[in-house]
Image (cartoon, rainbow, N blue to C red):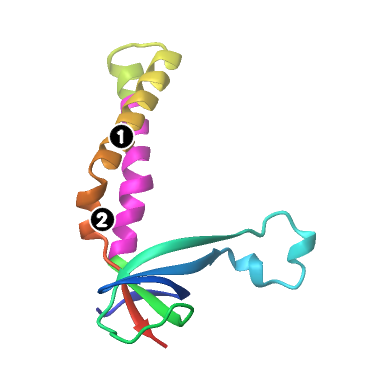
């Protein structure tokens, strides 16, 4: 894996070769000295399930959660780029080609985007198999 994304996290649970790791997802501002004065800083904690070959990990241990950079790009494309393209193209096609009103075109495009997200949700298990994380000891 040439290009990779890494996050440090704390092991929460261990089940065979699957490890649940708590990672802190934060914006660049969260480490700033003046973050308490600014409304833009935010931080979230997430639990990530990852695979490992380490046999002696312990709960509470700090580890690296690793993912391929290409996986991140694919996730961004599926979550943001494809819905945006659907929204824009469908709205323009409905207004310019079908001569629908702008309101009707926008509502239709939003319904189609909602259906797209529904299809992603239905296929969550299949997508989870494609998006793999690994854990390695620090």
User: Element at badge 1?
Assistant: helix
Q: Position of residue 27 (x, y in %)?
A: 58, 63
Q: Position of residue 106 (x, y in %)?
A: 41, 22
Residue 59, placed above or below residue 103: below
The quadrant in which residue 87 appears is top left
Q: Position of residue 26 (x, y in %)?
A: 56, 64
Image quadrant occupied by the N terminus: bottom left
Looking at the magenta stretch, what is its main secondary structure? helix
Image quadrant occupied by the C terminus: bottom left
The quadrant in which residue 90 appears is top left
> Measuring 25% from the left and 55% from the top, which residue is drawn there?
128
> Measuring 35% from the left and 11% from the top, which residue is drawn there?
100
Nearest the viewer among 68 and 13 is 13
Mark 2 or mark 1, earlier in chain: 1
Nearest the viewer among 41 and 81 is 41
The label number, if any, that marks residue 118 in the structure image: 1
Q: Which residues are magenta?
A: 71-91
Residue 112, placed above or below residue 56: above
Describe residue 9's horizontal placement relative to residue 51 as left or right. right
Describe residue 130's horizontal placement relative to residue 15 as left or right. left
Q: Is residue 84 magenta?
A: yes
Q: In this figure, which residue is indicated by the disc labeled 2?
A: 128
Please indicate, yes or no, whether residue 66 appears anywhere in the rendered image.
Answer: yes
The label number, if any, that marks residue 84 in the structure image: none
> Measuring 75% from the left and 58% from the top, which residue is drawn there?
38
Please indicate, yes or no, whether residue 68 appears anywhere in the rendered image.
Answer: no
Describe residue 120's horizontal placement relative to residue 23 as left or right. left
User: Element at badge 2?
Assistant: helix
Local packing at callout 1 (Cα closer than 10 Å; few below 14, some 14-19, many 20+) is few
């Amino acid at each position: 894996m040439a290009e990779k994304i890494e996050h440090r996290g704390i092991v929460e649970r261990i089940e065979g070769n699957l490890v649940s790791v708590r990672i802190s997802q934060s914006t660049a501002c969260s480490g700033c000295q003046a973050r308490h004065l600014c409304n833009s800083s935010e931080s979230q904690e997430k639990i990530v399930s990852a695979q490992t070959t380490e046999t002696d990990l312990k709960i509470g241990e700090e580890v690296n959660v690793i993912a391929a950079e290409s996986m991140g790009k694919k996730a961004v494309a599926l979550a943001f780029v494809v819905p945006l393209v659907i929204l824009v193209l469908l709205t323009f096609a409905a207004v310019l080609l079908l001569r629908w009103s702008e309101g009707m075109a926008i509502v239709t495009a939003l319904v189609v985007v909602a259906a797209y997200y529904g299809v992603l949700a239905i296929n969550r298990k299949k997508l989870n198999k494609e998006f793999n994380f690994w854990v390695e000891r620090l």
